[in-house]
Image (cartoon, rainbow, N blue to C red):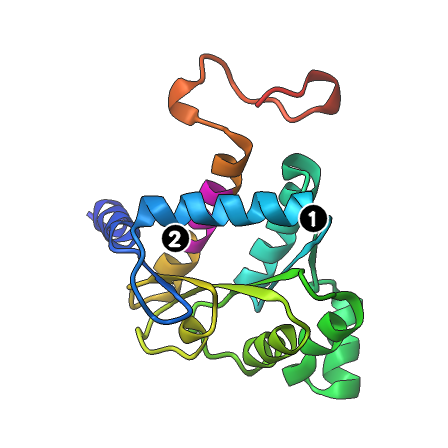
Amino acid sequence: MYYTRYLENHNKALKKLQITNIAGYPIDIEDSFLEICALTKALQDSGHKQFLIGNGASAAFANHMALDWTKNGGVPTHAFANSALLTAMGNDLGFDEAFSAPLSWYANSGDRLVTISSSGNSPNIMKAIEVARAKGMSVITFSGLKPDNASRKLGDLNFYIPAKTYGIVECAHQVLLHIWLDMFMGVKEWEKSEEQNMRKDEYRL
């Protein structure tokens, strides 16, 4: 029954998703995705860009979604997750500045920082949020585990998964990130009559 129980708990965590604004007030789930897509459209129209950051599996998600947002969504998006950058930051400046230092170099006022952190408490994530605010950037956070995690209080929109294990939180974050992108692009699995094709010469949503 392990598969069944895991799937039940994964779906339960997604159904209990909690979204709050910078003031800590809860926002309806459907309304929050409408809002994040509207904010992303405004970001795109203004010529600004996004930066996605995370550690471990969340770094992989950041890389993945940076590619998809740029290639498929048409929103220039970057992730500071390559090995040369991360090892240089860790060795030369300290891992706590792995994201905040490059963010200070590449980001501009009006850009957006998206943090993906299961615990919501990673020091390098917190420093990056601090730099983003100082530069006049907007912030969106994805977190989980403890409900009082630090990053959850600092985003303009905060997506929190109320689960107790990393696997469930990480899987749920990947689902949320794809919902955001697919909704922005107008991709609807339930309306498809054939498989999606992302090749440039046969591009179909």
Find residue 32 and report its horizontal and vertical position in percent.
38, 50
> Where 169 falls versus 133 (above or below)?
above
Outermost residue toward the top in this view = 193
* Residue 179 among magenta residues: yes
Tag 1: residue type? Ser
> Where 176 falls versus 139 (above or below)?
above
* Residue 202 among magenta residues: no
Residue ID at (63%, 72%): 132
Judge by depth and name the residue closer to the eye, 80 or 171: 80
Find residue 16 and report its horizontal and vertical position in percent.
25, 55
Q: Mark 1 points at which residue?
A: 46
Mark earlier in primary sequence (2, 1): 1
* Magenta span of residues: 172-180
Tag 2: residue type? Ala
Find residue 186 and report its horizontal and vertical position in percent.
50, 29
Circle on res. 172: 2
**In the visual, does 115 lie left or right of 118?**
right
Residue ID at (74%, 65%): 108
